[in-house]
Amino acid sequence: MLVKSPPSKNETKIPPPLLKRFLDYLFIECGLSGATITAYQRDLTEFWDDLIELDVDLVNISMEDIQKHLKRLHERNLSSSTIARHLASIKVFLRYLYAERSIRRDLASLIESVRKWRNVPRTLNVDQVEALLHAPDPSHELYLRDKALLELLYASGMRVTETVDLRVEQINLKLGYVRCMGKGRKERIIPIGRFAIEAITEYNEDLRPQLVGERRTTNLFVSRTGRALDRSAVWRLVRKYAQAASITAKVSPHTLRHSFATHLLSGGADLRIVQELLGHADVTTTQVYTHVDKDRLIEVHRKFHPRQ
């Protein structure tokens, strides 16, 4: 007779049907991305593990139980932003459970939203961006793809997930714009400049057909085997070319997004326009970029203050 072994420490302790219903709700009703849903699942798995250790019945969960979990997160020396994300995950989960009548009390209404300090994003100056964009080696077999990828990231400010998910039919090279599907499945139109248009056109005509071959891949950016390029590959490429450009700072695809926004605002772009281009739901998220360019602030002060 076979004896079923107990679940391992790393296995999810949240009841599978309940977890699946919640994750389906996030995907179908809320339209969240796969990466965001994975983060929710990871955070809530840790939350459930703590409830098991504390011998807490989900039906009778209390604010004290939640506070004990947060204390454990603090004891692990997690950053304030990570703990805030955990708390946000728990709040959404509890609100869902109460709506489904799986718990008796509306604990989500008792949890205050965490207001955390926004870190000033790491950006590159214009010269560094130029060096990065010229880093790919023209003799490399994937030069056209990598050049087009870097140009598009900086020209559009798109997130890495949005970029790897971009389909050929979502980009109009004649009119110079991209139809980007962002968070919450909200579509936005992003214009791109001639450098990105030229790079993407050359890649799309001279290299991509060779890489795709007989495959039916519709993603714009593909690997050497013709499969859709993934997030980690884009991260590695950006870091590789940052090193080739002798940029010592830590650079990621998101650095180009930050630089895109900062350079637009430095050039005088309206904050609301930049918000729309980035796909931010709240303008306060975009406002962080107004604190980056000190030279621009000094220039404006000297130009417009009457006592100069």
Image: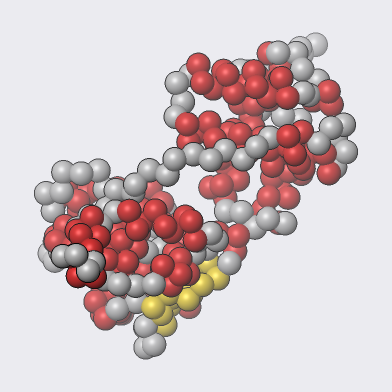
Residue 61 in the image: state x and y as whole percent: 78, 24
**Residue 15 falls left or right of residue 161:** right
> Could you tell me which residue is drawn at 84 percent across and 26 percent down?
59
Q: Position of residue 67 (x, y in %)?
A: 65, 22
Q: Residue furthest bottom?
A: 174
Q: Is residue 28 above or below residue 47?
A: below
Instruction: Name the quadrant containing residue 110.
Output: top right
What's the residue at 39%, 53% (across, down)? 288
Question: Residue at the location (25% across, 43% down)?
Answer: 250
| Quadrant of residue 177 within the rendered picture | bottom left
Q: Quadrant of residue 87?
A: top right
Q: For this view, does 133 lie left or right of residue 10?
A: left
In the image, 96 versus 298, the foreground residue is 298
Q: Residue at x 34, y 47 (%)?
A: 120
Placement of 121 over or under 31, stated as above or below: above
From the viewer's perspective, tell me whether residue 295 is left or right of residue 278: left
Res. 201 in view: yes
Q: Is residue 11 visible?
A: no
Q: How many marks?
A: 0
Q: Can you say which quadrant of the picture contains the C terminus?
A: bottom left
Query: Colour mode?
Result: secondary structure
Q: Quadrant of the N terminus?
A: top right
Q: Is residue 263 above or below residue 52?
A: below
Which residue reaches farthest front? 307
